Image (cartoon, helix red, strand yellow):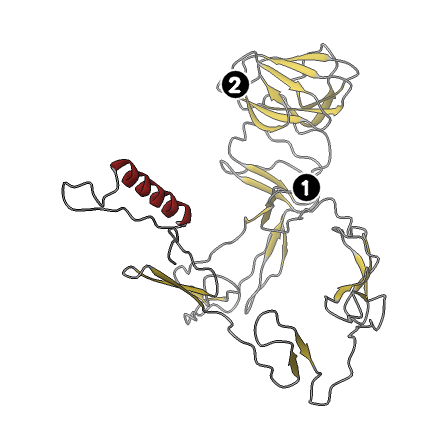
Amino acid sequence: MSISGQQTILIGLPNESVGSDSLYTAFTKINNNFDALFSCSSPYNTFTASNGIGISSNANTGIVTITNTGVTSIVAGANITISNSNGQVTISSNGGGGNGGGLTSVGIIAASNARLTVTGSPLVNNGNILLDLANSGVTQGTYSNPTVSIDSYGRITSAANGNLQGTVTSVGLTPGNGIQITGGPVTSNGTITVTNTGVTRISAGAGIQLSGNTGNITISAPATGGSVTSIAVSSNSLTVSGSPITTSGTISINLPNVFAGTLTTAAQPNITSVGTLTSLNVTGNATAGNVYANAGIVGANVVSANNERWSSSEDLASGAAANLSVIASYFTTTAAETATLAAGTNGQIKTFMMVADGGDMVITVTNPGWGGAGTMTFSAIGQGCTLQYINSKWFCIGNNGVTFA
């Protein structure tokens, strides 16, 4: 684009003023030309193309070319009418299928308003139709042991908290023969340990054959070819049953139900009563022997060498000294009470237990094996302990809740 109004400066021959503009006139024309140039120049020196526009420039000619790279014309296809091919264009649909069509609106109707909700229907121009599940009436939340109702469409239509089932408050085990139970009963959480205190393994000795080492085991002895055909036992003072044995079996030998007289045995014997032992006097010291009573010992107290009566007990009063001639001392407190325990004899056993609690019982012990103040404090029903006098001191060999200090 040319700029009009250019002023020409007259220049004559060198060093002559004829035909030449004066310096003032020449510089005025120059200044006017620059004013016209700057007033017509563009303030922009960078062209940035947006979407659908392309830009190219020629540095030699100074020409910038701007090109439409987007839609340059619109051609109507089937069932379409356009108002213009360029400029502002209106596009109209003549209907589908080539026959003009007749659909004027689109709508959705829920089969059941209790299951679905529809909003925005019908559409006659443009927009959105919204479908959603209808509110089932069930309150949102977490239910405990719930009772629920489900319809044929899989929706939960009702829900309610249920009651906890079961009334077990304690779990325990009762051991049979050869079984030991510890840790029970469990009333909240814990571990019950079951231990086999019977036979845990069998090994074959000389002349014995085993079918296995664990589980169901058959024990047998191979035939040795002996010549014994019968074994019998007889006694004038003992009761014998199962005799004689001609093939296999057991011979039982027991004391009679009533035994009168003096029983003299070798050193350190075992005396076993299968019936009822109503009277037994032992003269001397029984240091290693045992007395077994399968049917019970009936009669007076069993008295030990240190004058302990094993089947006797006392109600220990407040302020009293525990009786060393009885094994058990129990007490019922109505307020805070005290008692004492004197020194015993080596090997002696003494037990204490609280049967009713109206206040703490504090027992001061002479020669306590645990040191300290030598006290035992009972503060709740059922608390108890077992002491044994060993090496001139009382030691606790069993305790249930008693506090030692």
Residue found at the very far front of the displayed protein: 18
Q: Is residue 104 left or right of residue 274?
A: right
Q: Amino acid at mark 1?
A: Ser
Residue linked to disc 2: 370
In the image, residue 45 sits, relative to residue 84, either above or below, namely: above
In the image, residue 129 sits, relative to residue 77, either above or below, namely: above
Residue 54: which quarter of the image? bottom left
Q: Which mark is residue 290?
A: none
Front residue of this view, candidates 34 and 7? 7
Report if residue 95 is visible in the image: yes
- Residue found at x 58% / y 70%: 87
Q: Residue 252 in the image: state x and y as whole percent.
A: 60, 55
Q: Residue 287 in the image: state x and y as whole percent.
A: 51, 30
Residue 126: which quarter of the image? bottom right
Q: Amino acid at mark 2?
A: Trp
Residue linked to disc 1: 188
Q: Residue 378 in the image: state x and y as whole percent.
A: 68, 21
In the picture, which quadrant includes the N terminus?
bottom left
Front residue of this view, candidates 136 and 212? 136
Q: Secondary structure at mark 2?
A: loop
In the image, residue 59 sits, relative to residue 316, either above or below, namely: below
- Residue found at x 42% / y 56%: 48
Front residue of this view, candidates 44 and 40? 40
